[in-house]
Amino acid sequence: MNKEIKVGIIGVVGLVFFYLGSNFLKGIDFFSPINRYYAVYENVDGLIVANPIIVNGYTVGRVSNIRILQNRDNKILVSMDIDKGLVIGKNSKATLSSNDFLGSKAIVLTIGNINDPLNEGDTIDSEIAGGLSELLEKATPITDNLGVTISRLNEILSGLRGSGDMITTTLDNLNDVLTNTNNLIDTNEETITTTLQNLNNLTNDLSKKLDDIDPIIEGANSMINNLNKVDFEGTFNQIDIILTSMNGVFDDIESGEGGTLSLLLSDDSLYNNLNKTAYDLDKLLKHMNENPKHFFAPLGKSRKKIERDLRRQKNSN
C-alpha cells in the first residue's frame, strides 16, 4: 500500500471521527434507538438542526430536520428525534423557547398523560414561549420613559451649573434658619416643656370627659332604640281616626244633627231661656245669702213680713 492511499484512509477516518465527535458534542448519539415525532410552528425564531429537546432540564433528543410547509401557509415543520424509551402522552406539548441568555433555541417538552401515549411519527401540540426578543419589546416603553427621564435630569443639571453661588447662599440661609431655631428652642425650653405638659393634662382631662360622656351617649342610644320600638304608624293612625270622628261631630253640629249641643249653638231661644234661668238662680242664691231667716226660720215668715223687711232694707240703703 503506497503512501498516498494511507494518507487518504487516515483522512477519511479523521473526518468520520470529527463528524461523530462534533455531533456527540451536540448531543447526537448515533447508537441510541430513537422515535421521531413532529411539531408545527408559525415561526421557529432561529431554531436550527441539532438544537436540544429538553424535559425538566434534561436533554432527551434533538432537532433532526426543519422544513417549510408552503401548502400550509408557510408554517414550519420540525422533526424531533427523541429517546425511544420516553413515553409521550397525547396531551403533551412542545414549547419553543430560549435555551440560554444568548438566545440559542431549544424545544421544551411537557409530558402529558402517559397512559394515552402517542405513536411514533405523530405530531405533538406546539407553542412558542416569550423569548428575549419579546422581553425586549415589552421593555421598550420602559427604556423610552427612562430616556425621557434622563434627558430631563440632564436639563435640570445643566440649569444648575451656573447656579452654584445661589445654591450655596440658599444652603447658608437654611443653615442660619436651623441655627436660629435651635437657639429659640434652647432659650424657651422651660416654656415649651410647660406648654407640652399643659397640653398633655388637657388631653387627659378630655379623655376623662369623654368617659363621662359615654353613659350619656349610651342613654341616648337606649332612648333612640326605645323610640324605634314605638309603633308611630299605629299611633298616627289612631289619632287620624279620632280627628276624623271629631270632624264628623262638628259636621253634625253645623248641620243641626248634633242634639242638645247643636240646639245650643243654633237655637237662640234655648240659649236665652238658659241664660234667664241662670240669672234668676243667681238672684235667688244672693237673696238667700243676704236674708237666710226668710228661708231657714222655724216656721218661716209670712209674705207680708218678708215684703216689709225688704222695704226696710231698701229704705236703709
Image (spheres, grey):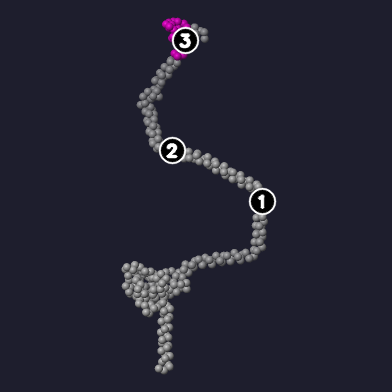
Residue drawn at point x = 64 percent, y = 63 percent: 163
Query: What secondary structure predominates along the stretch shown in magenta?
Result: helix
Mark closest to the chain's N terminus, 1 or 3: 1
The numbered mark at residue 291 is 3
- Check whether the beta carbons of the residues at disc 2 and disc 1 lie within 8 A of each other: no
Of circles 1 and 3, the one toward us is 1
Residue positioned most to the bottom: 2
Q: Residues within 10 Å of mark 2 (few under 14, many from 20)?
A: few
Type of amino acid at the residue the image marks with label 2: Asn
Mark closest to the chain's N terminus, 2 or 1: 1
Q: Which residue is denoted by mark 1 in the rendering? A: 186
Q: Which residue is denoted by mark 2 in the rendering? A: 226
Q: The magenta stretch spans which residues?
A: 283-309
> 112 or 132, which lies in front?
112
Residue 9 seen by the camera? yes
> 166 or 229, which lies in front?
229
Measure the alpha-carbon separation of dots 2 and 1.
59 Å
